[in-house]
Amino acid sequence: MAKGVWIVAEHRDGALRKVSFELASTARKLADQTGDEVAAVVVGSGVEAMAAELGKYGVDKVFVADNAAFEPYTTDAHAAAVAKAVKDNDPAILLVGASAQGKDLAAALVGKLAAGLATDCTDVKIEDGKLVAVRPMYAGKCFGEVVFNAAPAMASLRPNVFPIVETAKAGAVVKFDAGVDAGALKTKVVEVQKEASGKIDVAEANIIVSGGRGMKGPEGYGILEELAGVLGAAVGASRAAVDAGWRPQSDQVGQTGKVVSPNLYIACGISGAIQHLAGMSSSKYIVAINKDNEAPIFAKADYGVVDDLFKVVPALTTECKKLMA
Amino acid sequence: MNIVACVKQVPDTEAQIKVKPDGSGIDEGGIKWVMNPYDEFGVEEALKMKEKFGGDVTIVCVGPARAMETIRTALAMGADKGIHISDPALENADAYTTASALAAAIKGVPYDVILCGQRAIDDDSGQVGSVLAELLGIPQVTVVTKVDVDGQKVKVVRPIEGAQLVIESALPAVITATKGLNEPRYASLPGIMKAKKKPVDVKDAAALGVSADAKAKVGKFIPPPARPPGKIICADDTPEGKAAEVAKLLREEAKVI
Ligand SMILES: Cc1cc2nc3c(=O)[nH]c(=O)nc-3n(C[C@H](O)[C@H](O)[C@H](O)COP(=O)(O)OP(=O)(O)OC[C@H]3O[C@@H](n4cnc5c(N)ncnc54)[C@H](O)[C@@H]3O)c2cc1C
């Protein structure tokens, strides 16, 4: 019988990513309900020390595959390593981050393990001893409760949604040989082009300041960058702004961009087309700044400001600076 | 060079999604069906490869009878032939089952590259391309914005949080397409006429030896939680006054800044 709640811990540049602590905390909560242990898999090079850190968030045991061939991440190397650990230990539940890397890994594992996966979940719970995963579908136009008929039941968790809770556990290291032959790998990362440091990705931001066609051009985003700087926010964009070449593709929010659920979403000069609303309606709080009082975005906004954004946004930046000083 | 492009038929992005009262699915009445936008990027890239290197583009689709229209759209864009996997048993197939059906169909087709959309905008699962690669035992590169084929290798650009990765993969491989890769062409009128005569093979699950047992399924569909009505900030009717009021509400009421 499959047993235990597992996570795949994600790390980059030698440090665990925040989503790993979200996964560990969530796994602990589920395991306390099923009376199981929490185990993490860490695949990388020089990663053994990460085990202790995972222990702080409720991880009992950490399976570590340490090998130079695991840096940087490639799908074939990491999926093979995680699949080996899973096959050897037969966990009931496997949680992964719904980050770029986590989604890539999880989908490959579905193939390797003949398992079922609920992608980008916003809630997970135990019913009758089994995992039930809740996830947005149709970019959030509806939700689905996913049930599983195979082990492990897999879910990828949307970053920034699940709380981080400290629970001290052993985080005991179990080294394993993933049996991955570096020479046989078929893919290779040949270059990493980093974006300006400090840039926060919209998919992982607590606060998003987003601009649409109403920004009038790429220069218009200067005032959004300033507000974002004060709030520690990411800057997002509507498709109209991306298609006009004002903002990079990676900033697009919506049904054919990123589906986001930050604590606060500030929409500036965005009308609120159905494809945009789909991508951001699950944000906790929504502010809309638009000069057209009939814009559909106001139907979703907690706080609406009908006015010229070029006057409101700089004033908002000043006010936030004052309040947060 | 032989290329396979996988496509799915999905509700148009304009569609309002209504959940059936018993939560068993969505109400399909009034929905306009289109090719999944991410698959359009895949088909476009396949056609570009064909233009550059020659060869055939085969479209493979799992879907009910109406999905034939989406296959014809891809053929009208310029693809050469289609395989339509149509079986009521596959209607609510999960990613593993869908990929198994695709893999079984693709095994009978010569291929150097397989293109898929990075996710379908209906179930938003983003798994089928990856599972397909695993089942065929070939490498995968997912969610890419640039593809350069060079002999027996392909180089792609894959955006991740805060960076772009340049990844090299051996061929054959599965590549999943995302927005930014290209601008899909529209089908021309002569293209639409020609598409009617292009061959499409229709197969069912039994013919492919695929079991429809789902590993995961949506037990219940739920409408999104309603948002409580918001307020329009009037304050003293100046932009500065409204901004001050919003900042105060975000700080004191919402407690998010
Ligand atoms: C297949 C498909 C997929 C799509 N996917 C997406 C997606 O993922 N994401 C997405 O965003 N869109 C998507 N769209 C596009 C969508 O339909 C809209 O066209 C787009 O969202 C509009 O962007 P916008 O709100 O910035 O522009 P507009 O609709 O033009 O709105 C601009 C707004 O700015 C306001 N404004 C102008 N000047 C000012 C000012 N000075 N002060 C205050 N307000 C001002 C106007 O009142 C207006 O409401 C998709 C469309 C299709 C067909």
Image (cartoon, grey):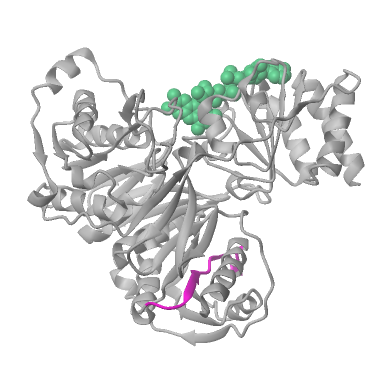
A270 in relation to A284, above or below: above
Quadrant for residue A266, please give it.
top right
- Residue A44 visible from this viewpoint: no
Residue at coordinates 36% horizontally, 23% vertically from top-left? B30
Residue at far front of view: B22
Examine the structure image and report whether residue A3 is included in the region drawn in magenta.
yes
Nearer to the camera, A179 or B152:
A179
Residue A189: image location, x then y, percent = 42, 58
A127 in relation to B150, above or below: below
Which quadrant of the render holds ligand 1? top right
B226 in relation to A262, above or below: above
Examine the structure image and report whether residue A232 is included in the region drawn in magenta.
no
Nearer to the camera, A253 or B146:
A253
Residue A140: image location, x then y, percent = 51, 40
Residue at coordinates 58% horizontally, 40% vertically from top-left? B225
- Residue A289 visible from this viewpoint: yes
Total numbered labels: 0
On screen, residue A230 versus residue B14, left or right, reads right
Magenta region: which residues?
A2-17
Residue at far top of view: B189
Query: Where's the N terminus of chain A, which quadrant?
Result: bottom left
Residue B43: image location, x then y, percent = 27, 34
Quadrant for residue A28, please give it.
bottom right
Residue A54: image location, x then y, percent = 61, 75
